[in-house]
Amino acid sequence: MSMRSELVQKKREVVAKNGMVVAESVEAAEAGLEIFEQGGNAVDAAVATAFCSCTCEPAMASLGGGGAALIYMAEAGRTAAVEFEGRLSKSATEDMFVDDLLPLGVNPHPSFGWRGTKDNVGWMGYRSLGVPGQVAGLCLILDRFGTMSLEQVIAPAIRICEEGFWINKYYALMIGSNMKLLQQYPPIDKLLLPGGYPPIPASQYDDPTIVVQQELAESLRKIAQGGADAFYQGDIAKDIFADTQPHGSIVTLQDYADYQPKYYDDGLVGSYRGHQLICMPEVFGGTQVLQTLSLLEGFDLSSLGHNSPRYLHLLAECFRRAWVDRFRYIGDPEFEDVPIEGLTSKAYAAEMRQHLNLESVPADIKPGSPWKYQGDGQAPAAGKPQGLRGAGKNTTHLCTMDKSGSMVSMVQTLGGGFGAYTMSGSTGIILRNYTNLFNPEPGTSNSIGPWKRPTSHDSLTLVFKDGVPLVAIGAPGGRRVITSVVQVLINAIDFGMGIQEAIAAPRIHIEGCDPKVPGGKLVKELFVDSRIDPETVREMERQGHKITTQLDGDFALPVGIMKNPSTGELHGGVTVPVPAAAIGLGL
């Protein structure tokens, strides 16, 4: 047996009492801390962090993107959810790319496997645009739950735009890897490829590229003064329209004027081992998080041993069951019937638990019948054939918690890396590729349609114990977000890990059926963190798993905050191999 050197990286858990911010960007986290220092609450800090993410995470977040937030206000004892993903234009039709469809098997979508389109127009470029929800969502959240003005929380983002920010090694590599696509749709190349070359990261030998964004600073200043109306009904929308409509965008000024984020008085509520969990409702990954945890709740996981072969096999089995149901049933409730209540039912979990194969990989897995546990127990009439769904990997996540226990879990996304690879030069705003998450083939439930919302695997979650706030958690990372969030929660609740240890521990990922094959087929491939014990891997191979090892960081990028109910201390944890940061205020 050969032995090899192994790179071991760690991050220290951050502990504070007066406020905590965790984010995928150091600059963004520092903005949240600045707001805490000025006396802001968790919402003020979250909104400031989010606006800053839009200035210094150009592949992940933008005023031209969207997202969602779960908010808990401790003094009122209430939870709310805001979905601001954005929408397709009201002019969008399911056949808008039908003349661009390529033959089956020719250049299929790299993430979702459906029919490819000529020059990839279905998932990049100006025809892929929709109405961004980011600005409307952040303004609504601040107005309802914040204590500070837009001018105050946007100030750090404006400063970053005007003074510039350093490109780190992580982003230099990402920009360089996407160089050809960034050159395809000017003027985004002038921003991210200065002089026609990838930016230089900071090192002991080279001065870093500093990105200054004067047009974006001016857009932020208009929003600070005029709120969401300045974006959707003012000069910003008009400038974006003027920059994009001549190149084929079908998004109209009326689309911008009509957009509103979706507000929920509560989230999707579930439980796990005496803890209350609140997730994002409807189109997000919370349904699957709760379904998977309900399946696992019937087993004593701690007795199996963390990341033992028996534990990981059980975990994989439960993930598979939930994924098969997700690919079969989950869609936008505005356009189709979705059995969310049935999928998250404890009774349904008990039924499906009986079908788990605890010894080996099963030959096949079929979707269950969650409609039995919802409403009158009758399934609705069959609609269009299900279109397999996915979510882009290029998202960013942040969480905040203040000393009162108020907390926010927020996701922001551009759908794909650098969105549509397009930027409105007049406003400095990078724009999201909205049609990317829809099947360009007409006739499926996930086909393109007017005013549709993209579905998402983002799994924003808040955890309470005996009514006391305990954890805020979330992650970017496409379909791997759901499995990552579940494992972090199990690490904390079942195995008693602190939040940094729970996030940094090795994970697995598996899906129930192949999303790239219409109709699906059982997936035996199990993605395993390379840090998991080799003997464990060999035992799982004997159980029938097809193992693929991957590095830490390929399993989504969770960030989270945990509150110690005894001391009131806030503990921040972030993914290790990327420049994510936890920053706390005051011991």
Image: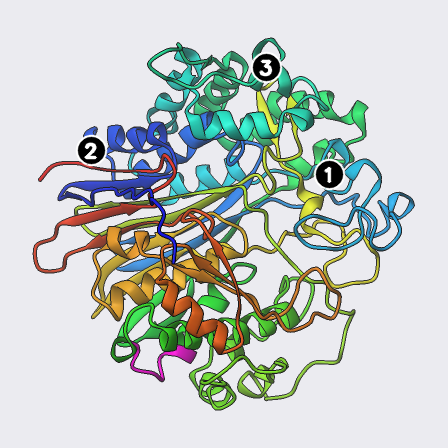
Badge number at residue 39: 2
Please rate how many residues cluster around mark 2, counting C-alpha atoms within 10 Å: few if below 14, some from 14 to 19, many from 20.
some
- Label 2, label 1: how far apart the Cα atoms are: 41 Å
| Pair 2/1: label in front | 1
- The residue at 33%/25% (across/down) is 152
User: With 66 as the anchor, is 94 left or right in this view?
Assistant: right
Q: Is residue 37 above or below residue 310?
A: above
Q: Nearer the viewer, mark 1 or mark 3?
A: 3
Check the picture and name the quadrant holding the C terminus: top left
State which tag comes first along the sequence, 2 or 1. Answer: 2
The answer to which image quadrant residue 6 occupies is top left
Q: Secondary structure at mark 2?
A: loop
The Cα atoms of the two marked residues, 1 and 3, are separated by 26 Å
**Which amino acid does the dot numbered 3 rest on?**
Tyr
433 in relation to 224, above or below? below
Residue at which label 3 appears = 197
Residue 224 percent coordinates (x, y): 43, 24
> Which marked residue is nearer to the observer: mark 2 or mark 3?
3
Q: Amino acid at mark 1?
A: Ser
Display coloring: rainbow
Secondary structure, mark 1, is: helix
Range of the magenta residues?
A: 295-301
Q: Please give the label number shown on residue 128.
A: 1
Kindly identify the amino acid type of the residue bearing the numbered disc 2: Gly
Asked whether 136 or 85 is in front, the reply is: 85
Left or right of 562? Residue 181 is right
Q: Please tell me whether mark 3 sits on a helix, a strand or a loop.
A: loop
Q: Residue at x 69, y 45 (%)?
A: 436
Is 158 rendered above or below residue 386? above
Per the rendering, the mark at residue 370 is none
Query: Does residue 387 appear anywhere in the picture?
Result: yes
- Answer with mark 1 or mark 3, whichever residue precedes in sequence: 1
